[in-house]
Amino acid sequence: TDIDQFIAGLPKAELHLHIEGTLEPELMFALARRNDVTMPYGSIDEIRQAYDFGNLQDFLDIYYAGTNVLRTPQDFHDLAAAYFDRAAQDNIVHAEIMFDPQAHTSRGVPFAHVIEGLLSAMRDAEERHGITSDLILSFLRHLSEEEAFDTLRAATPWLPQIKAVGLDSSEVGHPPEKFARVFAAAAEAGLKLCAHAGEEGPPAYVWEALDLLKVDRIDHGNRALEEDALVERLVDEQMVLTVCPLSNLKLCVIDDIASHPLDRMLEMGLRATVNSDDPAYFGGYLNDNYRAVTAARSLSREQVALLARNSITGSFLPQQAKDAHL
Ligand code: HPA
Ligand code: ZN
């Protein structure tokens, strides 16, 4: 339709994307074969049928199991290259990519293999598609703060090539406060700060991400809507929220795409963006997310254009690069 063409044509940035969540079943099988890894699934259909989640943890169990096929720098390169090829089709001009080093180092894969593979695909993407990108090193919040510090130390040789840290995995029971010191150390090292907050966790976790972690962006933030004072704070600070409509649906954060709060967020003055989170698991890439929520909530062209504009202004690009995309 008309609005779908409009969405497709807008230059967009993707700000909330877990690279491990772009592992399509076809590539999973190919890497399993290449690395001689036994798969817990017999077929691609069987994999897709397993992607029926009741909550975040159901998804995470399957997502971490999927990472087991990723072993060599070439594997991480191929994973990211496939994402960038797909991103180019959606007119993504810039991507800020989260990766979960602890999901790999815990299996004996060296940090260097993970990051060197990703960086080589990022260089290729700029050459082949003109897509710029940055890395967000995400800590797994179900692990300890000491393990997060170990990960930050392992990243030291690559700090100039890392833009930000993030905080993901099982939210409830692992409040931002647990990571206050490691986030302070990351800020001291010159990194930007992001944290998942208010996806399943309560509004208190969003307050903590702001006050204790001092984040530059909130990933998700849905449950902030439960507290007027928190919404007011987010609006006042023009805090960027990286909202993920199809993820919210698949992880049962919402019951129905028709009840997604994205347009309410915009109407309240929140600086929301649209993102795909883990597109191989949630049934859609970036434009699929825009199209689904636009149709379900009857977003106007102006609202869609604002979302795309927020993705550029809300990125960690330098001002002149932002201006070039606006
Ligand atoms: N939420 C929390 N942790 C994650 C997600 C998510 O949507 N995707 C990958 N790790
Ligand atoms: Zn996420």
Image (spheres, helix red, strand yellow):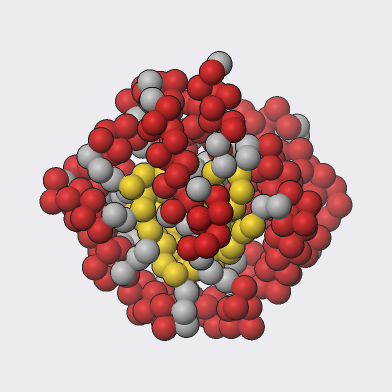
**Horizontal and vertical percent position of residue 305:** 44, 36
Q: Is residue 102 visible?
A: no
Give residue 87's quadrant in the image.
top right
Rendered image quadrant of residue 121: bottom right
Q: Please indicate whether residue 256 sits to the left or right of residue 27 in the image.
A: left
Image point 51% across, 65% down: which residue?
Answer: 318
How many circles with numbers are drawn on the protein?
0
Does residue 267 appear anywhere in the picture?
yes
Compare residues 191 and 61 and report the one nearer the observer: 191
Compared to 50, does 156 lie above or below? below
For the point 55% across and 83% down, the residue is 153
Q: In which quarter of the image is the N terminus?
A: top right
In the image shown, does 154 or 296 lie closer to the viewer?
A: 296
Which residue is located at x 54 percent, y 76 percent?
151
* Image spot of residue 283 (x, y percent): 57, 32
Tell me: residue 74, above or below residue 42. below
Q: In this view, does 263 lie above or below 112?
A: above
